[in-house]
Image (cartoon, rainbow, N blue to C red):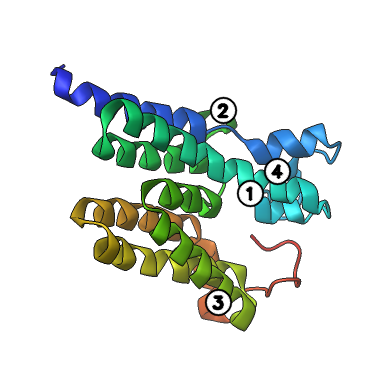
Amino acid sequence: MPNEFLPFILALALGYLFGSIPFGLILTRAAGLGDIRNIGSGNIGATNVLRTGNKKVAAATLVLDAFKAVAPVLIARYFWGEEPAMLAAVGAFLGHCFPVWLGFKGGKGVAVMIGSLLALAWPVGLIFCAVWLLIAFTRKISSLSALTAAATAPIFAYVLGNDRLAVTVLFLALLLFFQHRENIARLLKGTEPRIGGDKKAA
């Protein structure tokens, strides 16, 4: 294996290992809330953790899920540079969505994408959050907020960053869309629940 490829492989693996830590599952069990996979949509992310009724645990899940993308990106950037850092972000997203420890059934990646963007290019991350909040307040649909923010993120990454950042963010956005495929189907049917509505929808 050529040595020039090693940093990229290490960064991808580092990101995956961080990303695959199922904080939602760990925190809900530690709080005595049971197995999050048996609650609501069965998703291990912060949105489903919120359905337990424990806002503190949900907030902690959100922060830690974002952190598990921030950490490997910063570590990879420090040791190997900017391009491996981008691969670390991809690895963290893959680890969160497809954790080997949970049979490759993880979360949908919104918090991880926020953490990745803030670590790679914080202005893009802040814009992602702003778009999410704008759609959430106006349309009251969480999945639509995430999808809209993800759809616009590659554009801002290109304008405020560079081609490689834009491609990385586009890949993350496509993964997020894939993870939200059931939500997209409900949006098209007009059956996607609004924030504060149906507790069982993903």
First reached walking from the N terminus: tag 1 or tag 2 = 1
First reached walking from the N terminus: tag 1 or tag 4 = 4
Residue drawn at x 70%, y 43% is 37
Please indicate, yes or no, whether residue 88 appears anywhere in the rendered image.
yes
Residue drawn at x 37%, y 42% is 90
Disc 2 marks a residue whose amino acid type is Trp
CB under 8 Å between discs 4 and 3: no
How far separated are the C-alphas under marks 1 and 2? 20 Å
Residue that carries the numbered disc 1 in the rendered image: 62
How far separated are the C-alphas under marks 4 and 3? 27 Å
First reached walking from the N terminus: tag 2 or tag 4 = 4
35 or 12, nearer to the observer: 12
Residue that carries the numbered disc 3 in the rendered image: 135
Disc 1 marks a residue whose amino acid type is Leu
In the image: residue 23, left or right of residue 91: right
Disc 3 marks a residue whose amino acid type is Ile
How far separated are the C-alphas under marks 3 and 2? 34 Å
How far separated are the C-alphas under marks 2 and 4? 13 Å
Residue that carries the numbered disc 2 in the rendered image: 101
